[in-house]
Amino acid sequence: LGSRPTFYTAVGHDHDGLISRLNHCGVITENSVFRSSKYSTARYAALLDHRGDLVAAVSDMDCLQCIPVPPSAEDLVGVEYLVLDANAPADSLVRAAKNGVEAGAKVCFDPTSVPKASLLTKSSDFLSCLSYMFPNTDELYAMARALDDWVEPCGSETSLVEYASSCLLGNMREKACLVITRGHRGLLLATKSDDIISYHDLQAEKIDAITSSNGAGDTLCGSFIHAKLEGASDTQAAEFGQSAAKS
């Protein structure tokens, strides 16, 4: 797409050319990728059904616990969007989010999984730093249910999604936005402005044969941020991200 993100992470002793491949794709890794002699590079394998939905997964993410405390706010000056996922240590994520806000960046969060997402939601310091989140519906429910003021509602799935969204947005920054992925049903965009929450439904285009849905959420998130950097509105960015994730 042309954007050149800086990748802040840790890899193992067996990274096997991963860094050079990232550099070839335009990703900046200089002074931001830390090597562990103790662990293997993080790996993840997913088992999907015929619709591309996750059935089971196995992973080895221990290396990511070696990600050090992130740079200070001064090191992030000029960064427009800081994207975090839940694989790093929780205290590092909270520090990074605070530094991002202090530096003037919009902090974005990819929940990664239900257990990791709900753990971080318990930190009000973390939530209050977020401008964007990219959960699927399971992660959305788990994060909302982890809030202290959660009350289980009655009603349709739509009302549950909207209630969970409002609970999370109420703890996030002004003009915060949730980009909620719903599989074959497409995206739901939930946006807060002046304490008023609006919803925009983006239907998914039917795909006759799904080769693989691996990385679709990451593609959506990265493409969304790229479109925002190009001046797109939240809705335009979501449409662009949805199109990119489909390809």
Image (cartoon, rainbow, N blue to C red):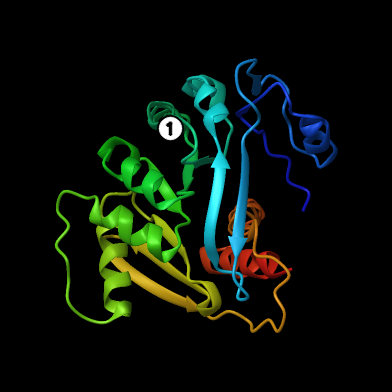
Where residue 202 appears, as percent x and y from the top left, is 52, 77
Check disc 1 and give the amino acid type.
Answer: Leu
The residue positioned farthest toward the right in the image shown? 24
Where residue 25 appears, as percent x and y from the top left, is 81, 42
Q: Residue at x 48, y 32 (%)?
A: 88
Residue closest to the eye, 163 or 237: 163
Q: Residue at x 40, y 44 (%)?
A: 116
Q: Is residue 173 above or below residue 90?
A: below
Q: Can residue 67 be seen in this view?
A: yes
With 201 as the anchor, is 38 left or right in this view?
right
Number of numbered discs present?
1
Q: Residue at x 43, y 26 (%)?
A: 92
- Pick the quarter of the image with the C terminus: bottom right
Q: Is residue 88 above or below residue 155?
A: above
The residue positioned farthest toward the top in the image shown? 37
Q: Is residue 128 visible?
A: no
* Quarter-of-image position of residue 5: top right
Classify mark 1: residues with Cα within 10 Å, few (<14), some (14-19) or many (20+): many
Where residue 190 appears, as percent x and y from the top left, is 39, 66
Residue closest to the eye, 125 or 138: 138
Where residue 49 appears, as percent x and y from the top left, is 59, 71
Residue identified by numbered label 1: 93
Q: Is residue 12 above or below residue 53?
A: above
- Under circle 1, the secondary element is helix
Residue closest to the eye, 44 or 86: 44
With 28 as the anchor, is 173 left or right in this view?
left
Q: Residue at x 60, y 55 (%)?
A: 46
